Image (tube, rainbow, N blue to C red):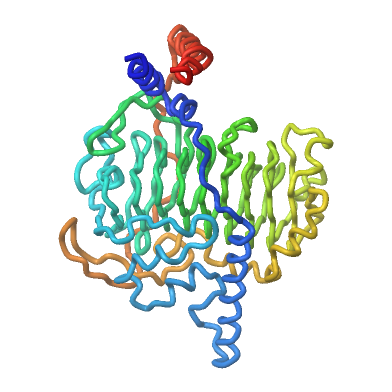
Amino acid sequence: MFSRNYIVVCFLLSSFSPLAKATFNLTFPTPHPNPDEVVQDVQSRVNASISRRQTLQISQNDESTCLTGNPIDDCWKCDSDWPNNRQRLADCAIGFGQYALGGKGGEYYIVIDSSDDDAVTPKPGTLRYAVIQPEPLWIVFPSNMLIKLKQELIFNSYKTLDGRGANVHIMGGGCITLQYISNVIIHNIHIHHCVQSGEANVRSSPTHFGWRTESDGDGISIFGSKDIWIDHCSLSHCKDGLIDAVMGSTAITISNNFFSHHNEVMLLGHSDDYKPDSGMQVTIAFNHFGEKLVQRMPRCRRGYIHVVNNDFTQWEMYAIGGSGNPTINSQGNRYTAPSNPNAKEVTKRVDTEGGDWRDWNWRSEGDILVNGAFFVASGEGVEVKYEKAYSVEPKSAVLINQLTMHSGVLGVGGRDNNLGKWSSGANGGGTGFGSGDDEDDDYSDEMSGSNMPLSPPFSNPSLFSLFIAVSSFLLLNIIPLLFML
């Protein structure tokens, strides 16, 4: 009886907020046992794709080939019938998030309704209705669409958001929340002007909805989740981070994205003291970090972060920062420093004295440093380790233009309009495809989010104090007794 009551009390306490749930969910993620093998595999795939492109150009004297040297794009774009073989994309990821299945093997769900009027009872045909379903779904869009969220868009596992062939924008409250789930692919979506939301009920599955406290206003929030791949998205103008991954999230690849107009771009890790984030493993590849960015590209706490073949064109404070002893492996990137003479350093050890970070494993290999940029490496005796781990030499960053030339959204509204699109059909209806341009005007990237005043989580101080007191009592007194029973 005692144990049963204890479980009920813990359940009630943990229902207050996601952070409270995480307090009672200190399960360490299962990282790849040898992250260096994953790093080497990424470089091998890049080198193989570049070699295939160069060989074809020499043999055919043709620079119009679909091969770009980017192993992700070359995996699916060279299939002329790819619009009818969309789920092939799920086989094309690289790095730590390469096992993200998304909705592979599931049915296609066609979003025909851009509204988001009810976060508890979403209408069939809307995006919110699709992402909460329990089964795998490959979610597509038959036309250009601007989706203004009222609340966080909370995903269930095994979903692919595939915006190829349409100009799809998501903005407003939230925006995208991946919480305690796995196997999600988000591809070819504009995500911008995300603001704080909450203090409302939001549905997360067909059988559950719950009260959500105030969100941070991230573009994509990854919370205690794994096997996540974010590819060919354009992200800007959000309240907090463009992409944040915290609370034991791992097995993540962030690739081919275009980041711009933002302060704190990307946070990886909840806090220096949150030990489950030691298992976080993230690949950041082929992205363009562009206009009016300030810092955190990314900012890392703990974990193993592989930053490879990205183009950092602007920052105001720093590009890559960290604390809590993360491993940062920078390979084949181009770092172009700003004109400010006080902001030339690529790296920043955040709130950490020099004597504390000298042994942190931060390495730069094959990077190109432009306009006075410099990378401060650290880690005594790591040279031998890295020489052994990377038997395939990272490709020179002189190829960075080629690898990142199509970063961001492709097709309608992007920089490469040669993608097929869904031409007809509704949910359960036709599946015809067409190719070519859409005559609809592109949506402008202007702010039109909610100005609704929001109150902070635990707006009642007495309730928050009671929660802390009871939690402390349970952790310090009840749990030890359980082990004695």
Q: Quadrant of residue 424?
A: bottom left
Q: Position of residue 453 (x, y in %)?
A: 42, 22
Residue drawn where x is 32% and y is 72% of the image: 435
With respect to residue 66, does 482 lie above or below?
above
Q: Quadrant of residue 274?
A: top right
Q: Of 29 and 344, which appears nearest the observer?
A: 29
Q: Position of residue 476 (x, y in %)?
A: 53, 14
Q: Position of residue 333 (x, y in %)?
A: 68, 60
Q: Quadrant of the C terminus?
A: top left
Residue drawn where x is 52% and y is 66% of the image: 406
Q: Position of residue 170 (x, y in %)?
A: 39, 46
Using residue 428 as the reference point, say whether residue 443 is left or right of it: right
Residue drawn where x is 60% and y is 71% of the image: 44
Q: Quadrant of residue 383?
A: bottom right
Q: Residue furthest top?
A: 462
With respect to residue 19, does 123 lie above or below?
below
Q: Residue furthest left?
A: 429
Q: Of 426 and 212, which appears nearest the observer?
A: 212
The reply to whether residue 69 is in sight is yes
Q: Quadrant of the N terminus?
A: top left
Using residue 464 as the reference point, say whether residue 4 is left or right of it: left
